[in-house]
Amino acid sequence: MSQRDLNSATKPDRGNELKHNYSPEHAGDSLTDFESIKPSTKLESLNLNWREKDLPERARTKHVHRLHPYLGKFVPQLVEIFLRKFEPITVCDPFCGSGTTLVEAAALGINAIGCDISEFNTLMARVKTGRYDLELLEREVNDILVRALSVSQLRLMEDAAPYNSNDYLEAWFAPTALTSLLSYRALIEDYTYQDVLKLILSRAARSARRTTHFDLDFPKCPQTEPYYCYKHSRICTPTEDSAKFLRRYSTDTVKRISEYAAIRRDVALLTITDDARRAQLPKFDLVITSPPYVGLIDYHEQHRYAYELLGLPWKAANEIGPALKGSSLRAKTEYVENMIESFQNVKKSLTRGGRMVVIVNDKSGLYDEIQERVGMSLETRLERHVNRRTGRRAGAFFESIFVWVAEE
Ligand SMILES: C[S@@+](CC[C@H](N)C(=O)[O-])C[C@H]1O[C@@H](n2cnc3c(N)ncnc32)[C@H](O)[C@@H]1O
């Protein structure tokens, strides 16, 4: 495919060539000129140890990458690097999560397939990569907001007790917040861009939960009283309101989708909600993925509020390596078998000589066995120093990037 923007600058001489299998500390300049990556660029020469000043949050969360929070996203620029390096016709991400690979592919004129077990994650990916009549989108987003928050609509919801709520929603939202959310939800079916509206609703719901400000990812129980807030270093009170979030995210969503529409190319995109072990995938010539890791994150659970509010199917039992199963030897063995099954299934649709780029913090060293048993050869392994700066998860760790080639 020749529609890509691979035309500009040549690779700068950084004078800090790094060897295969490196574990670099922050030293020298990291790569920031992403357009300079060409098929001839040597992966081992790239310094991917970005510090905040090299690759600030606003660049990592540009346009649709911040349409909705999602724990476990990878850095979009990493995907961009490998798409520019390998120039696929079609890329597949069998664990596509919030759709980072698809978003980056469409911006470079590359077809993309994404698969994920979680219905909410594929909803996010679809909304991010959708094509929109932007005027209609803005009209709909504004119209539902005005209608949902009108006095008569809210009164209707309050009177219609128990207005199709449930125990979870009533525990996690203050009555006023819940009324606005349910009022909005009841109107979604009147519009064309229902998935976008569902995402705005979910994002507002996430912010309006009765939680502490410092534990939005996995709050354990509703916070109904004022508390000492580690994030703001003062006493904070759980919110009673969701209308302000609905308003804020309506504006932000239209803005972000419009920004992306200006760079999104006309490519074929497919999003599948299925199990990577079994999904039937069309042909592709490159895989870029960051699979779930053993015992790390419960992907359905992190968006429980969205499942409850939108009535999405709950398939958490099919997640590979969920946190709730822990990281015991048994959990690791099960994980390895499930990953082998997934990659073997994915490999069936990979063209001859195609590559898989797998980005994972393999702290238990499981991926050599996975690669061998899937029947892939290791072309390159890079180590990237990841510096976490946010929230209470501060600390540093290394992330591996495996480049595998399909054995004949
Ligand atoms: C590390 S995340 C991927 C994040 C993604 N790279 C992004 O930037 O948003 C791993 C994903 O694997 C998904 N997953 C877990 N088990 C799965 C399975 N059996 N089949 C397909 N996807 C699965 C999870 O739902 C999660 O979204």
Image (tube, rainbow, N blue to C red):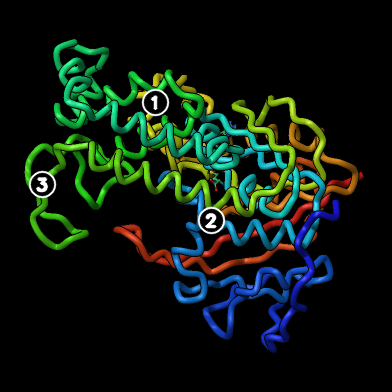
Residue 161, placed above or below residue 4: above
Q: Return the x and y of residue 14 as percentages of the image width and height.
A: 68, 86
Residue underneath mark 3: 237
Residue 234 lies left or right of residue 366; in this view the side is left
Which quadrant does ligand 1 occupy?
top right
Residue 45, placed above or below residue 140: below
Residue ID at (69%, 89%): 15
Q: Return the x and y of residue 288 as percentages of the image width and height.
A: 68, 49
Query: Which of disc 2 and disc 1 is earlier in sequence?
Result: 1
Judge whether residue 349 can be spotted in this image: yes
Residue underneath mark 2: 363
Amino acid tagged 2: Lys
Secondary structure of the residue carrying numbered label 1: helix
Secondary structure of the residue carrying numbered label 2: loop
Using the image as rendered, state which of residue 5 and residue 277 is in the foreground. Answer: 5
Residue ID at (23%, 37%): 243
Amino acid tagged 1: Tyr
Judge whether residue 330 can be spotted in this image: no
The quadrant in which residue 326 appears is top left
Residue 300 lies left or right of residue 290; in this view the side is left
The quadrant in which residue 30 appears is bottom right
Using the image as rendered, state which of residue 123 and residue 408 is in the foreground. Answer: 123
As measured in the structure, the alpha-carbon distance from the residue carrying label 1 to the one carrying label 3 is 25 Å
Secondary structure of the residue carrying numbered label 3: loop
Using the image as rendered, state which of residue 382 and residue 375 is in the foreground. Answer: 382
Q: Return the x and y of residue 333 as percentages of the image width and height.
A: 58, 37
Q: Which mark is residue 307?
A: 1
As measured in the structure, the alpha-carbon distance from the residue carrying label 1 to the one carrying label 2 is 31 Å
Q: Mark 1 Cα within 10 Å, few/some/many (few <14, many 20+)?
A: some
Residue ID at (74%, 35%): 346
Using the image as rendered, state which of residue 368 and residue 13 is in the foreground. Answer: 13
